[in-house]
């Protein structure tokens, strides 16, 4: 027992030092054989990868529309197993990953909380993850703790059985696969107007703790002529790390608390809810900030090609009456998550060539 404890301690040694490194210095650690192995940060994606993944997602959704195509997809990865480890509550991310796995034939196990694992007996989260890795070929984790997915991948990559780790949401930090589906949505919605390049995007709401807008902001470095407008109450303004990143990469942005003034001048509006699950005492955060809600009367003030997005779940930020407008893309955005995550999993397991061969 002492020998086991010493081995475990040595495995986790050095984590704090690694965690403090700038993200750019860590990216190669999460690659294998020149390809993505773990997906932890939005900064791992470049323009070529994003374009290729969007094309792959389009091909998968076309194949899935027919019985023969669906059967072909389901025969790609029946020899692979996935674990969905979702400690933090989730509907869309969990179901989209689950169904993305099903599309490709993977068998899926799930754990929706620590109360059903040996963590209740005192087992460390890292040892729980290593247990999962004994049985599966892919781990998708969602956790309220910032850095959890990164530590999971860091630990597993030093063991005799490393398996890919996909970050399904890590505290208020990052949500890289949400950023993928957001890019996929924007590219599809802007097909008739030249794609995402050159577009003006407003991000609205709790930008301080909204990991979706943080991750999407990182990806803007891959697109030409994009500009951002951050719209939020003073208390929820975008953090300085994102603003420093945008300045470093020459991406123009402005900040304002005047939502109404922004509406006529942007090509996409990304609404978010107040993330009060990260408050020290959520009961104290009862303000709904109605000045930052999108209402039916706002439809007359946005451009005919404007795209209205939301990562969901929503509360008060968008009136239900807005849903029927063709510019309301958030339900299409939600469904896009399944297709782009299926494309990502296919890429991780090198199955993309078999898919693309069907269209050669």
Image (spheres, rainbow, N blue to C red):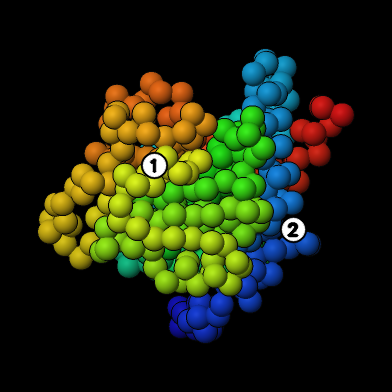
x and y percentages locating residue 110 in the rendered image: 45, 44
x and y percentages locating residue 292 in the rendered image: 27, 46
- The answer to whether 205 is drawn above or below residue 193 in the figure is below
x and y percentages locating residue 108 in the rendered image: 53, 39
Quick one: label 2 or label 1, which is nearer the N terminus?
2
* Residue at x 64%, y 18% (from the top left corner): 65
User: Which one is nearer the viewer's eye here, 91 or 62?
Assistant: 62
In this view, the residue farthest toward the right is 360
Secondary structure found at label 1 = helix
Q: In which quadrant of the rendered image does the N terminus lie? A: bottom left
In this view, the residue farthest toward the top is 67
Quadrant in the picture for residue 163: bottom right
Does the rendering let one see residue 118? no
Which disc is residue 35 wearing?
2
Quadrant in the picture for residue 24: bottom right
Mark 1 Cα-neighbour bin, 10 Å: few <14, some 14–19, many ≥20 = many
User: Which one is nearer the viewer's eye here, 251 or 176?
Assistant: 251
Residue named by callout 1:
263
Is label 2 in contact with label 1 (beta carbons under 8 Å)?
A: no
Q: Nearer the viewer, mark 2 or mark 1?
A: 1
Q: In which quadrant of the rendered image does the C terminus lie? A: top right
* Residue at x 31%, y 38% (from the top left corner): 294
């Amino acid at each position: 027992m002492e020998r086991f404890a010493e081995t475990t301690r040595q495995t986790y040694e050095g984590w704090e030092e690694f965690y403090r490194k700038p993200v750019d210095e860590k990216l190669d650690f999460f690659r294998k054989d020149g390809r993505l192995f773990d997906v932890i940060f939005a900064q791992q994606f470049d323009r070529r990868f994003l374009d290729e993944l969007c094309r792959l997602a389009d091909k998968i959704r076309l194949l899935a529309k027919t019985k023969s195509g669906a059967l072909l997809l389901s025969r790609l990865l029946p020899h692979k197993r996935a674990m969905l480890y979702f400690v933090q509550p989730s509907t869309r991310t969990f179901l989209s990953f689950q169904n993305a796995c099903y599309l490709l034939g993977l068998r899926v196990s799930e754990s929706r909380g620590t109360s059903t694992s040996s963590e209740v007996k005192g087992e460390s989260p890292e040892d729980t993850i290593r247990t999962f890795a004994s049985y599966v070929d892919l781990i998708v984790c969602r956790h309220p703790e910032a850095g959890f997915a990164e530590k999971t991948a860091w630990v597993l990559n030093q063991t005799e059985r490393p398996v890919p780790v996909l970050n399904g949401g890590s505290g208020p930090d990052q949500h890289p696969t949400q950023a993928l589906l957001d890019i996929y949505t924007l590219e599809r919605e802007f097909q008739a107007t030249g794609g995402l390049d050159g577009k003006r995007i407003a991000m609205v709401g709790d930008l301080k703790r909204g990991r979706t807008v943080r991750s999407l902001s990182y990806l803007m470095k891959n697109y030409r002529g994009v500009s951002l407008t951050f719209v939020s109450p003073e208390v929820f303004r975008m953090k300085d790390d994102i603003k420093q990143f945008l300045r470093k990469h020459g991406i123009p942005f402005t900040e304002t608390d005047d939502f109404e003034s922004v509406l006529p001048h942007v090509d996409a509006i990304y609404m978010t809810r107040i993330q009060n699950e990260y408050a020290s005492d959520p009961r104290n955060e009862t303000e709904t900030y109605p000045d930052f809600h999108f209402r039916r009367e706002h439809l007359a003030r946005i451009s005919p090609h404007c795209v209205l997005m939301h990562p969901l779940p929503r509360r008060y930020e968008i009136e239900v009456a807005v849903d029927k407008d063709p510019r309301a893309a958030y339900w299409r955005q939600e469904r896009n998550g399944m297709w782009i995550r299926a494309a990502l999993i296919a890429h991780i397991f090198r199955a993309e060539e078999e898919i693309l061969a069907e269209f050669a």
